[in-house]
Image (spheres, rainbow, N blue to C red):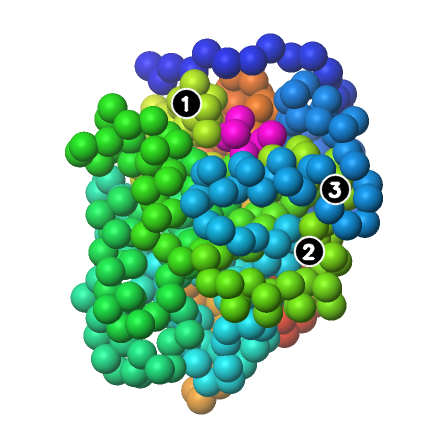
Amino acid sequence: MAKFPVEPFKIKAVEPIRQTSRAEREQVLRQANYNLFAVPAQDIYIDLMTDSGTSAMSDHQWAGMMMGDESYAGCRNFFNLQEAIRSITGFQYFVPTHQGRAAENVLFTCTVQPGQSVPSNMHFDTTQANIIARGGKPVNLVAEEGLDPVSHAPFKGDIDLGKLEAYIQQVGAENIPLGMLTVTNNSGGGQPVSMANIRATGNLLHQHGIPFFLDACRYAENAYFIKLRESGYADKSILEIAREMFSYADGCTMSAKKDALVNIGGFLAMNDELLYERACQQLILREGFPTYGGLAGRDLEAVARGLWEGLDEQYLAYRIGHTKYLADRLLEEGIPLLEPAGGHAVYLDARRFLPHIPQAELPGQALSCALYVEGGIRGVEIGSVMFAYEDPDSGEMLYPALELVRLAIPRRVYTQAHLDYVVESCQRIYARRQELRGLRYTYAPALLRHFTARFAPL
Ligand code: F0G
């Protein structure tokens, strides 16, 4: 029987959520043209669309918000954040940004020339889009196990080092301004990257003179997996593990909306002073003066405090256990998932859930709509709606290997009863899965289709 981890906190403020009737939800979904991005949040009961910016902040963070120093230059909260970032990452320089993709924009504007490539285990979609926006080429080289939905390899986020070496030989180090690793690998099921793989990636890139950056938004969850699963780390603190992870890299991009437990914020950190000076120029142009980035002083304080809270081992045991609980309960009911559970989300496997719906009829989207109608639950399709594309040469539709529905878990927000409710809703859908039908597009924009596409049931 799956076990729910005991929470290392109690609840001080509550936010009401509203159960609607099935008839209301059917009506809302029709009005939203079967796209959950178009459903108002007040009509959602359990919102598992993202773990980003959805954390419950602590009393310590809220207290810090009142200590916001809103001076344009040199506010005290900047120095508190600097102290946290330097102590945790060891990187000498940083600029605050309003969120992760702004850090990506600054980094790639300073480093990527048209035609150059940026290899990674797997880029997140905003990272990929920001590289493409600079004329660069994002390249995903995750190891084979990372693409197998049922492999229980401990570190399915690892990059394939053989492929990385071959890729560097193929295009030449001079055409690779930096290499990256996303920890944990969000686009690949929230799977962790091992310390051995981070170290080896750093060594390989550095042998070729290529800088190495981490996409670090879930670095603390990754560090906790290393402690649990990698030999030699069981007795190390999360802070020691995090410091070692960062020690192999030259810098990182960070969306603080994840492991720093805030609703908005991010940063770009690095050791290279010249890069820092160029980043400051970009920052002033796009985000703000380098001691506040795109944030208020109070937001900087919440990030500084959240960074430390996100490293707390009791919190991480709860956090990773919380996600695992949902996965284990679903597996007990025979519901097909991407295994094992990732750090921040559980991914339903819509291809195995709805084998009678072909990819052209969007099984992931059909399953997300069913979850909403059944329980007022919002997940996000990560399948053909997000990734299928028409081959420019043959005109043929190319479908992704995986059709997933991500149930991302906001940090410190939902209780065991909420998760049990999600499981019961999934169970009811699973029991009558044969009745589910696919969808067709009534509108599909060319770029980032999933946000604004419209559908009709078949
Ligand atoms: N990198 C990764 C791995 C991410 O998961 C995200 C955001 C970003 C970068 C960009 O950060 O949103 O602060 O600009 N992921 C969210 C999600 C949106 O739902 O997975 P941002």
Kindly identify the residue that appears in the image at 38 percent across and 47 percent down.
246
The residue pinned by badge 1 equals 313
Sequence-wise, the earlier of marks 2 and 3 is: 3
Q: Find residue 124 and report its horizontal and vertical position in percent.
A: 49, 57
Q: Find residue 227 and report its horizontal and vertical position in percent.
A: 29, 31
Residue 327 as seen in the image, left or right of residue 86: left
Q: Nearer the viewer, residue 432 or 336?
A: 336
Q: Nearer the viewer, residue 308 or 119?
A: 308
The residue pinned by badge 2 equals 290
Sequence-wise, the earlier of marks 1 and 2 is: 2
The kind of residue tagged 1 is Glu
Label 1 to label 3, Cα distance in Å? Answer: 30 Å
Task: State the SS at label 2.
Answer: loop
Spot the residue most to the bottom. 393
The disc at residue 75 is: 3
The kind of residue tagged 2 is Pro
Kindly identify the residue that appears in the image at 27 percent across and 44 percent down.
194
Front of the two marks 1 and 2: 2
In the picture, the quarter occupied by the C terminus is bottom right
Task: State the SS at label 1.
Answer: helix
Q: Find residue 411 and report its horizontal and vertical position in percent.
A: 56, 29
Report the predominant secondary structure element of the magenta stretch: helix
Chain part drawn in magenta: 305-310
Q: Quadrant of residue 16?
A: top right
Kindly identify the residue that appears in the image at 62 percent across and 36 percent down.
80
Residue 81 as seen in the image, left or right of residue 27: left
In the rendered view, tell whether residue 220 sits above or below residue 448.
above
Q: How crowded is mark 1: few (under 14 residues within 10 Å), some or many (20 or more)?
A: some
